């Protein structure tokens, strides 16, 4: 679970980097691509709100369309760009590659969101531990030390199971993957002027 949780955090940072790269190249393309940049930022906002239920209200997307529709609209705008120099053609190709990377990274993050621990596994572990500690209790003398020890063991195992279940859902609950990388990229994208 720890490995999966760390991998999800890495996927989120990679996703934020893909968004930032696409925005930088849209800015370098110039005035013709300036209209696409707010769509990219709005798409990122939509993904943030859709993925993290605790996202700040200030990060709500301006466009109420689903993020995938915003990305499709952005892709259409990029494909409609008509570069007149080799340099602009190269930037357009790079932007299209980065949009594919954004889509790929989004599916990775979505896959991380749906990777859960099977309920049957948790039930079997709880039953197994309950049987083990019941057998300890049957043969142990009834005194304060034994009762205290069994209580502390049960609390520590319950805490460990709680951590496992919480970390299995990386975007909700008490322990979450931080959305900071994505919020910082959105703030940066919206604060940069477009060239041309």
Image (cartoon, rainbow, N blue to C red):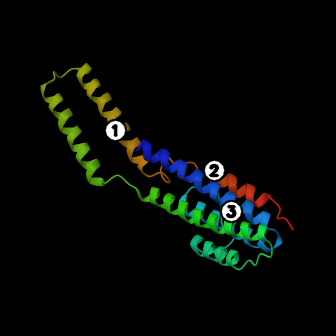
Splitting the image into 4 quarters, where does residue 151 fall? top left
Q: Position of residue 78 (x, y in %)?
A: 69, 74
Marks 2, 1: nearer the viewer:
2
112 in relation to 166, above or below: below
Splitting the image into 4 quarters, where does residue 95 fall? bottom right
Q: Quadrant of the N terminus?
A: top left
Q: Which mark is residue 181?
A: 2
Q: Which mark is residue 22?
A: 3
Q: Position of residue 113 (x, y in %)?
A: 46, 57
Left or right: 181 as drawn, with respect to 121? right
At a point 18% along the width and 23% down the height, the residue shown is 142
How packed mark 2 is, by other alpha carbons closer than 10 Å (few <14, some 14-19, many 20 or more), is some
At a point 49% along the width and 53% down the height, the residue shown is 172
How packed mark 3 is, by other alpha carbons closer than 10 Å (few <14, some 14-19, many 20 or more), is many
Marks 2, 3: nearer the viewer:
3
Left or right: 127 as drawn, with respect to 8? left
Q: Earlier in the sequence, mark 2 or mark 3?
A: 3
Q: Position of residue 3 (x, y in %)?
A: 43, 43
Q: Which residue is mark 1?
A: 158
Give the residue furthest to the left. 139
Marks 1, 3: nearer the viewer:
3
């Amino acid at each position: 679970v720890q490995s999966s949780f760390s991998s999800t955090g890495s996927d989120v940072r990679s996703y934020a980097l893909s968004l930032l790269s696409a925005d930088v190249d849209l800015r370098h393309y110039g005035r013709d691509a300036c209209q696409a940049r707010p769509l990219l930022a709005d798409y990122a906002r939509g993904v943030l709100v859709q993925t993290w239920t605790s996202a700040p209200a200030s990060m709500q997307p301006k466009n109420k369309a689903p993020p995938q529709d915003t990305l499709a609209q952005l892709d259409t705008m990029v494909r409609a760009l008509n570069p007149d120099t080799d340099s602009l053609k190269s930037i357009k190709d790079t932007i299209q590659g980065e949009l594919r990377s954004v889509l790929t990274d989004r599916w990775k993050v979505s896959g991380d969101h749906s990777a859960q621990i099977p309920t049957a596994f948790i039930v079997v572990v709880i039953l197994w531990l309950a049987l083990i500690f019941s057998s300890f209790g049957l043969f142990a003398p009834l005194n304060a030390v034994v009762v205290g020890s069994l209580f502390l063991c049960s609390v520590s195992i319950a805490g460990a199971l709680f951590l496992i279940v919480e970390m299995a859902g990386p975007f909700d609950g008490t322990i979450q993957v931080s959305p900071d990388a994505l919020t910082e990229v959105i703030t940066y994208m919206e604060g940069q002027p477009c060239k041309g």
